Image (cartoon, coloured by chain):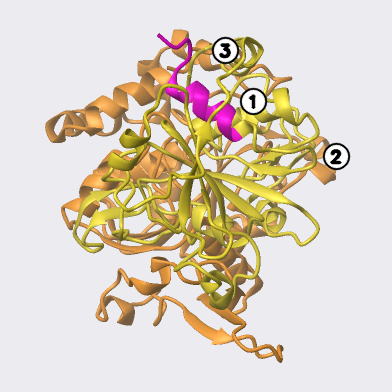
Chain colours: A orange, B yellow
Amino acid sequence: MTLDEAVKRFIKDGCQLAIGGFTVTRNPMAVIFEIIRQKIKDIHLVCHSNGQALDVLIGAGAVRRLEIAYGGNGRYAPTCIRFKKAVQQGRIEFEDYSNYQMSLRFLAGSLNIPFITTKSGLGSDILNCEGFSKETRKDRKVARKKYVTMENPFSDEEADPVVLLPALNPDVALLHAQYVGDDGTVRIKGLTFADLEQAKAADIVIVTCEEIVPQSFIRLDPDQNSLPSFFVDAIVKVPYGAHPTACYAFYDYDPKHLNFYKRAAGDDSLFEEYLREWVYGVRSHEEYLEKIGIRQLQQIKANPVLGYAAGLDRK
Amino acid sequence: MRGYTDNEMMALSAGRLIKDGDIVFAGTGVSMLAATAAKRIYAPKAVVFFETGGIDPALEEIPMAVADLRVMSGTSLNSGLIEAFSIVGHRKLHTIAFLGAAQIDRYGNLNTTSLGDYWKPRTRFSGSGGACDVASFASGVITFMQHEKRRFVEKLDYLTSVGWYRGGDSRQRLGLPRGGSLAVVTNLGVLKFEEHSKKMFLAEYYPGVPLESIIENTGFSVDTSKAREAVPPSEEELRILREEVDPQKLIL
């Protein structure tokens, strides 16, 4: 399947979307750019710590509603710039959780249980302040309550409260992996973040990958594999599909592009220009990579033993 | 003229609080320096790990974010968020978390979410990330702050991560039996918390920093009567920090 087909077929206006990766690493950028090119609107994004993908998607006006733990991109954006603007200008509905809470909500969704419990957040304004309005809480895919607290029903102790969090089952989960076998088995190298919980919780899973490899290779060392094929609805080979974020053992994050983005994102008209040039102005991820240029792609190429680009100028 | 920077003094002050056997949770920025310095200088048997799931990485190059590929390289194990949080609160482990914040109050509660009205904030920050979680579960939290009046406040605009909550035993009464804020490391000194009241007090001021400037830059009253001058960084500490921990000067 091509990227264009995968997005046309599976991603609808108003859908609830989970994005793989974490801040500067393994964001499924190629799919995100295609979603923007196809002008998908009113997305309900559910995430722990999405960085670049979150920011571009919000900046392009594709996101209506957000459940989030963290919007930042390392030294390139301590707070994601378009996210910050959208919240400050009241252009987006948002609800704060923590990383662990969001990961648990995906885990609950993957286990098909309606809620999950933790002690995280007791005493915090994450529990005291509710971002979504009563009206929003009536919508499809929005939990009727942000959370519930109750006393531990298994304990004799007084004052042993727990927090109950509603499960998440996104319409679509996107993830970028290093390898997919030609039998559809997915292999993520490096950290998996909450990608596997998100994928198993979602109705539809779109996987982009650096390389499609023979079944005989992926089954030689099954301990390394992340997801069996039956969870996956679309597989698209997109080398450098996470650029400008990093992909362990393949390439580092791209400091040059992320610094360029930082300057663009800080100014409304420069950001429009960024989208026109780097998203709407290219027809495919290949064309985007041609613009990035072979010199830069070589700079960020990872040492396959270390997993990152040693000595890369990251300022 | 002193021969070291604020970030160097902060990283070393925090690093000195880490002991062999501690399991150290590091975040971005100075905390990355402090964790790496702690392991190289003071506590080689401490283990550094990240909320993203990277456990005990080689840290040959300093990571600039917790999802940096460098937290996945030379690790004992690469996992994910849920596994990482199972470590933070594990009853068998002594876990110390490094955090940073935009605002802190006298009980070590932190704000990393927003300033002004939550729904229409004057300034929006990144949000909790894993901070609320580790503040709930870790054995202790060490917080890095720029020492400014607008950051050391009577009342937080938003309480993202719980420290000693309202002081005394109020944290335990919330249902959080372990943990709490151990120390606050700033560009002027190190603050700790009274044993019973859990109020912040000044434990150390850096060489050359007058007590008045600490009092002036703290937005609530702070006891300075127990404060002593901090030991300045040794040449060896500075050499390791500059040559081994962050030779690229990415954070330094």
Where does the image place residue A305, in percent across and percent down from the top left? 74, 20
Residue type pointed to by label 3: Arg
Residue type pointed to by label 1: Ala
Q: Which residue is mark 2?
A: A221
Neighbourhood count class around disc 1 (C-alpha, 10 Å): few under 14, some 14–19, many 20 upward: many
Is residue B2 part of the magenta span, yes or no?
Answer: yes
Magenta-colored segment: predominant secondary structure: helix
Which image quadrant for residue A93? bottom left
Same-subunit check for callouts 3 and 2: no
Q: Which residue is mark 3?
A: B242
Q: Residue at x 55, y 38 (%)?
A: B66
Q: Residue at x 67, y 33 (%)?
A: B72
Residue type pointed to by label 2: Asp
Asked whether B231 or B39 is in front, the reply is B231
Give the extent of the magenta segment.
B1-14
Picture layout, residue A141 above or below residue A18: below
Is residue B75 part of the magenta span, yes or no?
Answer: no
Q: Which residue is mark 1?
A: B37
Where does the image place residue A104, in percent across and percent down from the top left? 59, 65
Image quadrant in which the C terminus of chain A is located: top left
Q: Identify the subunit bearing mark 3.
A: B
Which badge, 1 or 3, comes first in the chain's sequence? 1
Asked whether A284 or B222 is in front, the reply is B222
Which image quadrant for residue A31? top left
Which element type, helix, strand or loop, lies under badge 3? helix
Q: Identify the subunit bearing mark 1.
A: B
Picture layout, residue A154 above or below residue A90: below
